[in-house]
């Protein structure tokens, strides 16, 4: 069972789908259930004072800190931003530090890597250090670099930005990079016990791209911190993710049929319709946590970090990345093959199609390079909101996120003269 995080306010056949909706509450993690309950109670408490006949009333009625989403077939939605961080017990500080820095220059040869080094403002001594046999090795799929802490810190800012831009394009380097939105820097570090000097080291190992700091070299930074608590505090801050609590406004005047048509995907229409119809009897209306209409798998995952490792005696570990998350969204039993890129691509070709109109709940959001290669996927929820997991490692939770922010973040994974494309795909079987 995924472990609950720390919160800081701020396509399938019917036989593969989950059991009826009425059973899901027993599966909801404690933290998700608390958030769900809070969303519902808010409507009861604030609903006693104001009516719901006008849009202005709804705005006055919004839960504290919430923002109305754009209007659409999803109904009246509001979101409340907040940040989450991984629990201390699941942060492998020593393992991360001992692993060291591993940068794969995929497709590079010895000669092309030397040419790359010469195109940067690295000094001759620094270039020579990168070619040292203890650092440089030729692999079947490219050149692997394992620089020590001093070499990582010695890279000039311009060279660092150029090397990071190249390295981030290769999926093999995904676990080596962290994208930190500039707006979250205060929440991540200043309020988390991270020392000012540690924040300076973070910026030294980062380059800027749009609204993000792109950070790599975590083992090198950890080696510079004198105590275990300081290392733990920094990694914990690094795991912080900006997400949101999403609520649907239900009143006696709500169009139950329209809302059920939008939110009742798969075999959920009866359950979703029952839930929505039941809430319309509240005279003053209520703000329903969207978890009440999501399938069991994402309901159990959301706002949590994966903590249970696969038993090696049962076969290869499952790659629970963004694609595994997206294509298993409506499944009761996850298909482990969705952690394989070729399997995902074939699934898209065989069982999905680009919808003719606007995206709708349950569509797959695909972020791809100009050459068509896919670098990220998510599940469309509503407005500019999707369900996502931004990486396969344990420090990335399942969460709700803004599609526009993900586009900004993942744009660093293509050359500066190229742009990512956002496409939508709908399951033919739904």
Image (cartoon, helix red, strand yellow):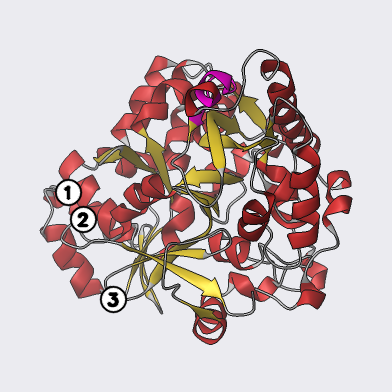
Q: Residues within 10 Å of mark 2 (few under 14, many from 20)?
A: few
Q: CA distance from mark 2 to mark 3?
A: 34 Å
Q: Is the C-beta separation of discs 3 and 1 under 8 Å?
A: no
Q: Earlier in the sequence, mark 2 or mark 3?
A: 2
- Residue bounds of the magenta highlight: 58-67
- For marks 2 and 3, give the one nearer the viewer: 3
| Residue 106 appears in view | yes
Q: In the displayed structure, would residue 416 be above or below residue 424? A: above
Q: Earlier in the sequence, mark 3 or mark 1?
A: 1
Q: Residues within 10 Å of mark 3 (few under 14, many from 20)?
A: few
**Which of the pair 15/103 is nearer the observer?**
15
Residue behind mark 1: 125
Q: In the displayed structure, would residue 97 be above or below residue 183? A: below
Q: CA distance from mark 1 to mark 2?
A: 5 Å
The residue at 71%/50% (across/down) is 293
Q: Position of residue 220 (x, y in %)?
A: 42, 39
């Amino acid at each position: 069972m995924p472990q609950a995080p720390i919160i800081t306010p701020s396509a399938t056949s019917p036989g593969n789908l989950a059991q009826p909706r009425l059973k899901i509450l027993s599966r909801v993690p404690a933290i998700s259930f608390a958030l769900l309950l809070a969303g519902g109670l808010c409507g009861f408490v604030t609903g006693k004072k104001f009516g719901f006949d006008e849009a202005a009333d709804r705005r006055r009625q919004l839960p504290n800190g919430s923002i109305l989403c754009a209007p659409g077939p999803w109904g009246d939605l509001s979101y409340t931003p907040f940040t989450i961080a991984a629990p201390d017990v699941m942060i492998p500080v020593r393992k991360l530090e001992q692993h060291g820095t591993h940068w794969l220059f995929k497709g590079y040869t010895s000669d092309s890597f030397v040419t790359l080094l010469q195109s940067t403002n690295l000094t001759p001594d620094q270039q020579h250090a990168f070619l040292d046999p203890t650092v440089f090795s030729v692999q079947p799929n490219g050149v692997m670099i394992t620089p020590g802490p001093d070499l990582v810190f010695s890279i000039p800012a311009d060279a660092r930005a150029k090397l990071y831009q190249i390295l981030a394009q290769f999926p093999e380097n995904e676990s080596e990079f962290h994208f930190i939105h500039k707006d979250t820097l205060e929440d991540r570090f200043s309020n988390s016990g991270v020392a000012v000097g540690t924040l300076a080291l973070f910026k030294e190992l980062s380059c800027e791209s749009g609204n993000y700091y792109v950070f790599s070299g975590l083992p090198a930074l950890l080696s510079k911190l004198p105590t275990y608590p300081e290392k733990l505090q920094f990694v914990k801050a690094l795991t912080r993710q900006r997400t949101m609590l999403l609520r649907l406004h239900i009143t006696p005047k709500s169009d139950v049929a329209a809302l059920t048509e939008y939110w009742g995907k798969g075999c959920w229409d009866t359950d979703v319709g029952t839930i929505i119809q039941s809430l319309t009897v509240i005279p003053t209306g209520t703000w329903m946590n969207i978890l009440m209409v999501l399938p069991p798998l994402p309901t159990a995952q959301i706002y949590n970090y994966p903590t249970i490792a696969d038993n090696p005696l049962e076969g290869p570990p499952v790659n629970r990345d963004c694609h595994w998350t997206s294509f298993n969204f409506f499944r009761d039993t996850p298909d482990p093959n969705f952690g394989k890129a070729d399997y995902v691509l074939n699934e898209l070709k065989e069982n999905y199609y680009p919808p003719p109109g606007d995206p709708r709940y349950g569509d797959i959001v695909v972020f791809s390079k100009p050459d068509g290669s896919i670098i990220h996927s998510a599940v469309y929820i509503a407005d500019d909101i999707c369900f996502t997991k931004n990486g396969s490692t344990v420090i990335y939770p399942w969460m709700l996120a803004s599609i526009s922010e993900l586009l900004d973040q993942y744009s660093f994974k293509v050359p500066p003269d190229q742009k990512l494309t956002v496409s939508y795909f709908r399951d033919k079987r739904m």
